[in-house]
Image (tube, grey):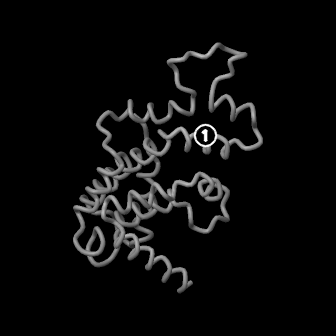
Amino acid sequence: MQINDSYIIYKELCSIVFGRTLSETEAQQIHDITYGMLLAFQSEFFGSPVVRKKFVRLSFAGNCCFACSAAAPDPAVAPPDPAAPPPAAAAANVVSAAHPELQSFDFYGKRFRSEFRGTYHCGVEPGPVDIMVWALTELGKADSGGERLVIQRLQHMDLGPGIDRWIAACDLTEWYQAINGIRAWLEYAE
């Protein structure tokens, strides 16, 4: 069984950020986001040949040998198997094979929206579940500053339009604007 550090880290950070532990319901929702929504995000975005190619090119910049072998096997070393995807292409298949119950990214977004109890998932104020989903949207949009290398590379992958489509398709536009407003206020208060 794979251990997903996102779930463990987030569960522990809740007490620091919110001054309390996750409720039983929130713990289950965070688990579902980690092993559902997050995996669906990875599977769908990295299932795209365009995104995979950008990811490999940006992640292994300066290491041509590794970038080329991750994108496609070297025919000089081993004849290509036409039925086998390149190593980077196999990533989405590995996620799907390991989690046959995995639904679409839209499914998880619509389920998240259907559980709202007000402006936010948790009611009138954002809670742990809201923050985790918002962090996922920011990861995809990669517009949070750009000073870190990972964020710079994600910006060049241009996942933002896909995240914007997901936010709209799942009726999360008002939620996203509200939670982004809180982020702007917090940055201003610093």
- The relative height of residue 125 versus residue 14 in the rendered view (above or below) is below
Say which residue appears at 56% left-offset and 55% top-offset. Answer: 158
Name the amino acid type tagged 1: Lys
Residue 127 point in image, percent of width and height: 34, 70
- The relative height of residue 168 versus residue 124 in the rendered view (above or below) is above
Say which residue appears at 57% left-offset and 27% top-offset. Answer: 86
Residue 126 or residue 172, whichever sits in front: 172
Residue 6 point in image, percent of width and height: 45, 51
Which quadrant of the rendered structure holds the N terminus? top left
State the image quarter where residue 27 is shown. bottom left
Mark 1, residue position:
53
Left or right of 161 on screen, residue 14: left
Say which residue appears at 44% left-offset and 69% top-offset. Answer: 16
Residue 151 or residue 52, whichever sits in front: 52
Report the residue that reaches farthest toward the bottom: 189
Say which residue appears at 56% left-offset and 40% top-offset. Answer: 52
State the image quarter where residue 156 is shown. bottom right
**Regarding mark 1 in the picture, which secondary structure is present there?**
helix
Residue 122 point in image, percent of width and height: 27, 70
